[in-house]
Image (cartoon, rainbow, N blue to C red):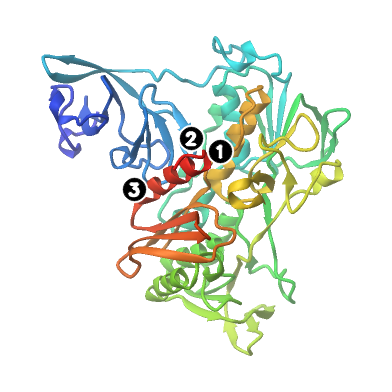
């Protein structure tokens, strides 16, 4: 039980006047030592846990949409009626409390179990897709242990699927919170035990067979089997490809030296941390999101850090000169040195030589120049590819019974002007969930508004939508003050919104883009 002195708002167990709740409003309080969010939906009163189950974001500062609430930090969504986590990045539900009203006073009573719980393997819930759909596969194999694969496996069980679920991951570790690798964990602000998405017993309890350090080398679409590097085969009734992407290395002399690292897995991050503890200077090649987050984290560890990139300003191509300047200033305030408008000519044991003739000493070099989708398996199996794996609106590939999700999936998005492939964690999780439901015959279209966030020093930015192309931007607020919303337009159509210091505005933009996608204005 928590110390009540640390809890905000009224003690809801003792009652609050109904008048304190605006119609369709929310009120933060506590009950039995836990933070509780009390909500009024028309004539109904509802109470759920007040902290998001992703990073414990404050749901009371989020936005109500019908009988749901969205977290202001990373846009997870919860049912106010059941506590169920309706949208990633949250995968766990929040608790619910019983509510009653007496004489104009609202009382929050005992906690009750969330209505929606993960089904135990072998005992599908009544009315579950497996129980009602003849399309449910005999078994599911998931190739990949990242965001999409983990979210798909969990959704299958949450939807009541009781058949065998097997995850085959080339990574040596269990699925982990990959965005944290370049942020708090690399910076030394988060312990490693925060990173795994689930403990080992979760997979046992849910009867999910997770094989780490396992590489799939071939897909036999006729036999419906995948072949592993050790010669074993796994038969599948439905197959999800969630192989992610692989970091690109520069084609320069010395790129394969041991001090040249990339960051994709937990093992990569452990190696980076170990190396960072033995050197004084690091150079980051590339001003990508990963590259700049790594630069921020290595500075937090006390290293001298330089960033080398060909553009005139970091992130200018994606976000424009205004944001590029904001990002550069944030890094320079914290001691990062930029070498822009140039590239690396060669790397040796003691540093780098740039194309402009500058020599940089470095004991550690981190490459962040982008990634390449891992589509070789699919292409070799005859699955249609095009700068990714081509999928339909429901994320099924050109081969029936095989789906793709995450960094490899290139799906038809009319709101972005055609097929897109987006390398965002939340997109990957939501695609994994959609693919899982469609394996069970749901027939769901993937139409989520893309979202991601980046954290660099004291600068945190959120981005919703996808502006593959834009011809103008508008700024509301002050970027210098860290309080702004930047909207990207193509003609009269709003494509995306980037916010700095405006979490609720980011949610509002997401909701508005959803409405526009649905044909509502």
> Counting residues from the N terminus, which is met first, the one under dot 1 or under dot 2?
2
Q: How far apart are marks 1 and 2 (CA)?
A: 7 Å
Q: Is mark 1 on a helix, strand or loop?
A: helix
Residue 2: give its label: none
Q: Is residue 422 shown above or below 117?
A: below
Q: What element carries label 3?
A: helix
Q: Can residue 248 be seen in this view?
A: yes
Q: Where is residue 176 in the image (x, y as percent from the top left)?
A: 55, 43
Q: Is residue 174 visible?
A: no
Labelled pair 1, 2 in contact (Cβ < 8 Å): yes
Labelled pair 2, 3 in contact (Cβ < 8 Å): no
Circle 2 crowding by C-alpha within 10 Å: few under 14, some 14–19, many from 20: some
Q: How far apart are marks 2 and 3 (CA)?
A: 17 Å
> Counting residues from the N terminus, which is met first, the one under dot 3 or under dot 1?
1
Left or right placement of residue 453 versus residue 132 in this view: left
Q: In which quarter of the image is the C terminus?
A: top left
* Residue at the disc numbered 2: 87
Q: Is residue 425 shown above or below 489?
A: above
Q: Position of residue 85 (x, y in %)?
A: 45, 30
Residue in the image at 45% along x and 43% along y: 194
Eye-nearest disc, 3 or 1? 3
* Residue at the disc numbered 3: 504
* Residue at the disc numbered 1: 430
Residue in the image at 83% along x and 30% along y: 225
């Amino acid at each position: 039980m928590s110390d009540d002195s640390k809890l905000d708002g009224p003690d809801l167990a003792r009652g609050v006047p109904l008048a304190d709740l605006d119609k369709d409003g929310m009120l933060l309080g506590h009950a039995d030592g836990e933070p509780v969010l009390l909500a009024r939906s028309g004539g109904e009163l509802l109470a759920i846990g007040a902290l998001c189950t992703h990073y414990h974001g404050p749901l009371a500062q989020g936005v109500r949409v019908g009988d749901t609430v969205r977290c202001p930090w990373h846009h997870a969504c919860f049912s106010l009626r059941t506590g169920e986590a309706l949208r990633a990045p949250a995968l766990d539900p929040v608790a619910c409390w019983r509510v009653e009203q007496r004489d104009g006073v609202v009382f929050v009573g005992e906690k009750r179990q969330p209505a929606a719980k993960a089904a135990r393997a072998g005992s599908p819930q009544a009315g579950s897709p497996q129980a009602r759909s003849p399309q449910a596969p005999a078994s599911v194999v998931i190739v990949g242990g990242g965001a999409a694969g983990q979210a798909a496996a969990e959704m299958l069980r949450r939807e009541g699927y009781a058949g065998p679920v097997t995850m085959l991951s080339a990574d040596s570790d269990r699925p982990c919170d990959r965005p944290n690798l370049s942020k708090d964990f690399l910076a030394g602000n988060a312990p490693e035990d925060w990173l795994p998405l689930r403990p080992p017993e979760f997979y046992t309890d849910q009867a999910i067979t997770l094989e780490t350090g396992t590489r799939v080398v071939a897909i036999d679409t006729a036999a419906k089997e995948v072949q592993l590097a050790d010669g074993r085969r796994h038969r599948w009734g439905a197959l999800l490809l969630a192989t992610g992407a692989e970091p690109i290395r520069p084609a320069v002399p010395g790129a394969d030296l041991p001090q040249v690292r990339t960051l994709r897995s937990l093992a990569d991050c452990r190696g980076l941390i170990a190396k960072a503890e033995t050197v004084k200077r690091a150079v980051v090649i590339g001003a990508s999101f990963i590259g700049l987050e790594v630069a921020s984290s290595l500075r937090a560890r006390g290293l001298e850090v330089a960033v080398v990139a060909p553009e005139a300003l970091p992130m200018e191509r994606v976000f424009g000169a205004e944001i590029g300047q904001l990002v550069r200033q944030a890094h320079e305030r914290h001691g990062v040195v930029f070498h822009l408008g140039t590239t690396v000519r060669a790397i040796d044991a003691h540093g780098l030589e740039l194309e402009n003739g500058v020599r940089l000493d470095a004991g550690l070099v981190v490459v962040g120049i982008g990634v390449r989708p891992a589509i070789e398996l699919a292409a070799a199996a005859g699955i249609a590819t095009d700068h990714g794996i081509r999928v339909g609106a429901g994320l099924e590939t050109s081969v029936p019974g095989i789906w793709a999700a995450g960094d490899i999936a290139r799906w038809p998005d009319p709101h972005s002007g055609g097929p897109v492939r987006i390398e965002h964690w939340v997109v990957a999780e939501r695609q994994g969930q959609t693919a899982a439901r469609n394996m069970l015959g749901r027939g769901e279209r993937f139409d989520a508004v893309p979202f991601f966030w980046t954290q660099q020093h004291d600068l945190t930015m959120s981005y919703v939508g996808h502006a593959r192309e834009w011809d103008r931007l508008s700024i509301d607020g002050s970027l210098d003050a860290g309080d702004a919303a930047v909207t990207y337009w193509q003609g009269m159509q709003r494509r995306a919104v980037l916010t700095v210091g405006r979490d609720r505005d980011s949610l509002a933009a997401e909701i508005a883009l959803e409405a526009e996608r649905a044909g509502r204005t």
